[in-house]
C-alpha cells in the first residue's frame, strides 16, 4: 500500500501523446497529469528566473543558440566547441576514464586545433587504494591486485586549479560522473557516456530492449 505522504513519481511526460509543451501556449490540450497543469506556480517562477537572472539567461541563450546553430548537422564535438565560444570559454577541461585515454587525446587534439587551451586529468589520479573507502578485496574488479580508486573529486579540483572554464566528461563510470558533476567548479558537458558493453553507445540497450537486451525489461530476479 502506498503511503500518501511519500513523494509520488512524476511520470506524465512518459505517457504524453500531445507534447503540448512544444506548442504555443493554449494551442494544444495538456493531459490531466501534465506538470504544466499541476505545477503552474513553480513553472512560472522558473520562467521569471530565466528573465531576471542575467547570467542564467545568457547561459540558457547560448545553449539554445548552439542547439539551433548546428541542428542535425554538427557533431557533438562541434557543438561543444560552439557552446564554449558562446559562453566565452577558452580553456576546456577534460575529465576522462583511464580506459578512454585515446579518445581523450583525440578530443584534445581537435579542441586545440580549433584554438582552445586544454587541460586533462585522468580518473586514477592520486592512486588511492579502493580499500581506503572500505572495499573488500573480493569487491574489486581483479581481487588480489592493487586497484586505484576512480577519483573524480581530484579531477574536479585539479581542473579548477588549472582554471578551466568548461569541463568535458569522457567516459567516467556511473556514479563517478555524478561525483564530478557535484564537485566541478566549471560547467560540465558530456562527450562520451561510458558503456563498455555497447562500445560506449548506451542508447543501444534501449533500442534493443525488446530483443537482444530483453533481460532489462524483466526486472531483478530473486
Image (spheres, grey):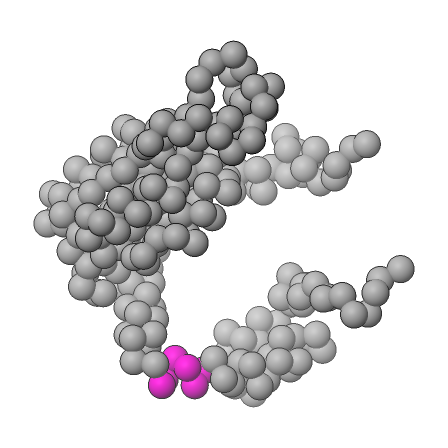
Say which residue appears at 83% left-offset and 65% top-offset.
3
Residue 82 visible in the shown view: no
Left or right, 191 with reference to 10: left
Left or right, 117 with reference to 59: left
Q: Is residue 27 magenta?
A: no
- Viewport quadrant of the N terminus: bottom right
Residue nearest the observer in this picture, 176 or 37: 176
- Viewport quadrant of the C terminus: top right
Q: Quadrant of residue 111?
A: top left
- Residue 97, x across and y down, in percent: 37, 33
Image height of 159 relative to 64, above or below: above
Say which residue appears at 43% left-offset and 54% top-offset.
182
Left or right, 83 with reference to 206: left
- Majority SS type along the magenta span: helix
Image height of 51 relative to 218, above or below: below
Give the magenta-colored segment's residue range.
47-52
Q: Quadrant of residue 221?
A: top right
Amino acid at each position: 500500500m502506498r503511503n500518501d505522504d511519500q513523494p509520488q513519481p512524476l511520470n506524465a511526460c512518459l505517457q504524453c501523446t500531445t507534447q503540448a509543451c512544444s506548442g504555443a501556449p493554449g494551442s494544444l490540450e495538456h493531459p490531466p497529469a501534465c506538470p504544466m497543469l499541476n505545477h503552474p506556480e513553480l513553472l512560472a517562477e522558473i520562467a521569471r528566473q530565466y528573465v531576471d537572472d542575467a547570467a542564467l539567461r545568457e547561459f540558457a541563450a547560448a545553449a539554445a543558440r548552439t542547439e539551433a546553430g548546428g541542428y542535425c548537422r554538427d557533431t557533438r564535438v562541434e557543438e561543444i566547441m560552439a557552446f564554449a565560444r558562446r559562453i566565452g570559454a577558452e580553456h576546456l577541461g577534460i575529465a576522462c576514464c583511464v580506459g578512454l585515454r585515446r579518445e581523450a587525446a583525440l578530443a584534445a587534439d581537435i579542441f586545440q586545433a580549433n584554438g582552445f587551451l586544454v587541460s586533462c586529468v585522468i580518473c586514477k589520479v592520486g592512486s588511492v587504494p579502493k580499500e581506503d573507502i572500505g572495499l573488500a578485496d573480493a569487491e574489486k574488479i581483479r581481487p588480489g591486485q592493487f586497484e586505484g580508486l576512480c577519483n573524480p573529486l581530484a579531477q574536479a579540483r585539479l581542473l579548477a586549479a588549472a582554471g578551466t572554464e568548461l569541463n568535458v566528461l569522457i567516459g567516467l563510470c556511473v556514479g563517478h560522473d555524478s561525483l564530478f558533476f557535484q564537485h566541478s567548479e566549471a560547467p560540465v558537458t558530456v562527450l562520451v557516456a561510458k558503456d563498455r558493453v555497447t562500445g560506449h553507445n548506451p542508447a543501444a540497450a534501449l533500442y534493443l530492449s525488446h530483443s537482444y537486451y530483453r533481460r532489462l525489461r524483466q526486472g531483478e530476479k530473486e
